Image (spheres, rainbow, N blue to C red):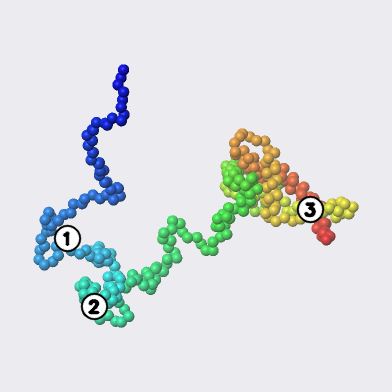
């Protein structure tokens, strides 16, 4: 039977030794640490002995920037700054400071002995006066274009030089009519493709029964200028007027046909809308995003050659307008 454990019996004394506290060495942060620098003293590296009474080789004072530039200009022959007229108002500083007056350099002591008139100073704050600068400007500076890769534009600047009006009026109007859903980039690309097709196409053959606008160049020269090519094609089939129907003007509820003249921009718009309508009915050849531009370009060539149906639409409008020319004096009832 194991003996009973008596918890109330006094425990045997055990020797306990106190452990010395561990003190961590303090390390400053990296931003506060500094590496000891080795200073060279006179005992380790003595200064060289100077010759005579002048300053040593390491004690000579460097010349001023202006003095150094003047010395270099005298050597090279290009001419340096004029120390007599340029610099800072040192004399004014010396007049205000008595201590600086005693320590001023020998150059200023020689200058102070000379007589200087009142209201002037030997050192000016301006490098050159405006009169001197004006004298250095060449008389023919308007003819020179220094600093420009290309020559300056002639004045007055033409209206076409504006950023928003840098394209031809016809090209800008055609681009706006081609544009859909506000996609101007797509419209500009299609216009460029149309002009490229007109430029690379063979010269057209003009139909004498469908004459072009007066003053048009020969057909063989049209591909050389695609913008003029497109302009002549649009202006040749542009109607001179439109027909407006006035309801009840003829009496008995019958509409009266009244011709209304159009401006140049309105005429071109109507003609190009007819060309777009005729081009949309053309047969598509091939695939890709250039098919639309190809069909429009082929329709423009057909207009020049007199094979397009746009000529018939223009002729029908003109015939109706000539028949209704007696209605031009009709006035609306208010």
Q: Residues within 10 Å of mark 3 (few under 14, many from 20)?
A: few
Tell me how far mark 3 sits from mark 2, CA to CA. Answer: 98 Å
**Residue 153, above or below 102:** above
Q: The N terminus is located in which quarter?
A: top left
Q: What residue is at 22 percent from the left and 79 percent from the top?
A: 113
Q: Nearest the camera: 16 or 291?
A: 16
**Residue 325, above or below 128:** above
Residue extending farthest to the top is: 1
Q: What residue is at 24 percent from the left and 73 percent from the top?
A: 100
Q: Is residue 324 visible?
A: no
What secondary structure is marked by label 3?
strand
Q: Nearest the camera: 206 or 241?
A: 241
**Where is residue 71 drawn, in percent x and y?**
23, 65
Number of numbered tags placed on the structure image: 3
Q: Earlier in the sequence, mark 3 or mark 2?
A: 2
Tell me how far mark 1 sits from mark 3, CA to CA. Answer: 102 Å
What secondary structure is marked by label 1?
loop
Residue that badge 2 annotates: 112
Question: In the drawing, does residue 213 fall left or right of residue 39?
Answer: right
Question: In the drawing, does residue 5 fall left or right of residue 218?
Answer: left
Residue that badge 1 annotates: 58
**Where is residue 293 drawn, in percent x and y?**
62, 41
Q: In the rendering, which numbered label is found on residue 244? A: 3
Foreground label between 3 and 2 = 2
Q: In the rendering, which numbered label is found on residue 175? A: none
**Where is residue 108 drawn, in percent x and y?**
23, 74
Q: What residue is at 66 percent from the left and 42 percent from the top?
A: 299
What is the quadrant of residue 283 in the picture? top right
Tell me how far mark 1 sits from mark 2, CA to CA. Answer: 30 Å
Q: Earlier in the sequence, mark 1 or mark 3?
A: 1
Foreground label between 1 and 3 = 1
């Amino acid at each position: 039977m194991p003996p009973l454990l008596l918890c109330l019996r006094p425990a045997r004394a055990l020797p306990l030794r106190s452990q010395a506290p561990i003190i961590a060495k303090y390390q400053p942060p990296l931003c506060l640490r500094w590496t000891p620098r080795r200073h060279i003293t006179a005992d380790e590296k003595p200064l060289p002995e100077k010759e005579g009474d002048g300053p040593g080789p390491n004690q000579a004072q460097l010349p001023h920037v202006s003095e150094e530039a003047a010395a270099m200009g005298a050597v090279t022959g290009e001419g340096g700054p004029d120390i007599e007229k340029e610099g800072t108002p040192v004399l004014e500083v010396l007049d205000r400071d008595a201590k600086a007056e005693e320590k001023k350099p020998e150059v200023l002591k020689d200058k102070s002995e000379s007589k200087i008139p009142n209201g002037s100073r030997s050192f000016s704050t301006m490098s050159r006066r405006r009169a001197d600068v004006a004298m250095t400007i060449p008389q023919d500076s308007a003819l020179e274009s220094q600093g420009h890769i290309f020559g300056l534009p002639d004045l007055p600047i033409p209206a076409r030089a504006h950023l928003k009006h840098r394209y031809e009026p016809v090209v800008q109007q055609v681009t706006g009519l081609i544009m859909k859903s506000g996609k101007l980039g797509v419209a500009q690309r299609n216009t460029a493709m149309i002009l490229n097709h007109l430029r690379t196409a063979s010269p057209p053959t003009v139909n004498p029964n469908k004459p072009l606008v007066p003053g048009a160049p020969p057909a063989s020269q049209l591909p050389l200028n695609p913008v003029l090519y497109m302009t002549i094609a649009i202006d040749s089939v542009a109607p001179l007027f439109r027909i407006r129907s006035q309801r009840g003007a003829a009496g008995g509820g019958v509409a009266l046909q009244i011709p209304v003249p159009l401006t140049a921009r309105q005429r071109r718009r109507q003609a190009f809308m007819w060309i777009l309508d005729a081009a949309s009915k053309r047969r598509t050849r091939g695939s890709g995003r250039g098919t639309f531009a190809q069909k429009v370009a082929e329709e423009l060539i057909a207009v020049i050659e007199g094979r397009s149906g746009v000529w018939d639409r223009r002729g029908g409008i003109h015939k109706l307008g000539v028949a209704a020319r007696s209605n031009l004096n009709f006035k609306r009832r208010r």
